[in-house]
Amino acid sequence: MANNPSEEKLKKKDYAQELERLQVELVKLQEWIKHSGLKVAVIFEGRDAAGKGGVIKRIMEKLNPRVCRIAALPKPTEREKTQWYFQRYVAHLPSAGEIVLFDRSWYNRAGVEKVMGFCSDEEYDEFLRSCPEFERMLLRSGIILLKYWFSVSDEEQESRFLKRINTPIKRWKFSPMDLESRGRWAEYSAAKDKMFAYTDTKQCPWWVVDADDKKKARINCISHLISHIPYEEIHYPHIELPEVNKEGYVRAPADSQTFVPDRFSGHKP
């Protein structure tokens, strides 16, 4: 779903202010999750270049990586291919007091694996049957599970691909699979529609993020995430730093250590 071209884009200043406010709330949410022992798993799916990585980066930016971590699994090993399909993902689920952000997830089977022929029809059909029950099991175990689908138009995806190809610091983001996705747009669309038909359940719905405007998508997604996990602000006790006790310590001479060169030594603005 594309944004209306006539819509005014979010101004950089407004975006920065709102993102900062939301990141403060994310820190409060993190502390509440750690304090209350909640278990939170968030799935980010969508087409290539839809902006999943961007929102994950902004969520993680101010958080403690010991509390909030990213699960971005590589392709399965030969051993993992013989396991129960969900098995390798289970190992990355959150324990009490943790948030896990899945940068892609078990839904690989419903998308790229189906379209690219990396799984059999029988494996695909079994996934569609078992996935909703698997997620209901997670919910019954006490895990808070949120699923976001980032929707991007063909035109906007093409624009982002061209930027990746032509920008040196972004070139690594473009893969041969991205080329395949361009040629299989209709197949990916059909696979997404069928995935939603089976897994967009009342207990665990898909939340669609209109991602043609990256800044709006980040703000909307983070705001929605925060609103769906009830939390309270943790109030810390007042702390006064004591004076540093340097008694008996003699610092080694500076010339006895090897320092990184100061590139700006003597630099005048």
Image: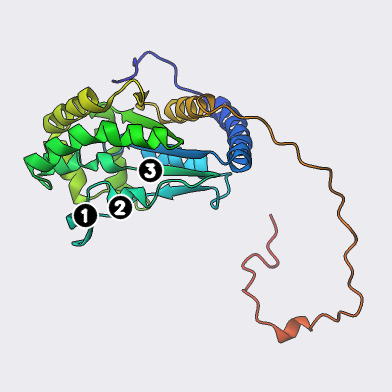
Say which residue label 2 marks: 88
Q: How many marks?
A: 3
Which is nearer the N-term, disc 1 or disc 3?
1
Residue at 59 percent of width and 40 percent of height: 30
From the image, state whether disc 3 or disc 2 is nearer to you: 2
Kindly state the secondary structure of the residue where label 1 is placed.
Answer: loop
Q: Marks 3 and 2: CB-CB under 8 Å?
A: no
Say which residue label 3 marks: 102
Which is nearer the N-term, disc 3 or disc 2?
2
Residue type at the position of mark 1 = Gln
Depth check: 11 or 212 in front? 212
Q: Is residue 51 visible?
A: no
Q: Is residue 268 left or right of residue 146?
A: right
Kindly state the secondary structure of the residue where label 2 is placed.
Answer: helix
Depth check: 151 or 99 in front? 99
Say which residue label 1 marks: 83
Q: CA distance from mark 2 to mark 1?
A: 8 Å
Depth check: 120 or 63 in front? 120
Residue at 70 percent of width and 36 percent of height: 234
Compared with 187, 118 (above or below) is: below
Compared with 16, 61 (above or below) is: below
Please state the horizontal and vertical placement of residue 267, each as a whole percent of the image.
Answer: 68, 62
> Callout 2: 10 Å neighbours few (<14), some, many (20+)?
some
Q: CA distance from mark 3 to mark 2?
A: 13 Å
Q: CA distance from mark 1 to mark 3?
A: 20 Å
Quadrant of the frame with the C terminus: bottom right
Quadrant of the frame with the N terminus: top left
Kindly state the secondary structure of the residue where label 3 is placed.
Answer: strand
Q: Marks 2 and 1: CB-CB under 8 Å?
A: yes
> Callout 1: 10 Å neighbours few (<14), some, many (20+)?
few
Please state the horizontal and vertical placement of residue 23, each as a whole percent of the image.
Answer: 58, 35
Residue at 26 percent of width and 28 percent of height: 199
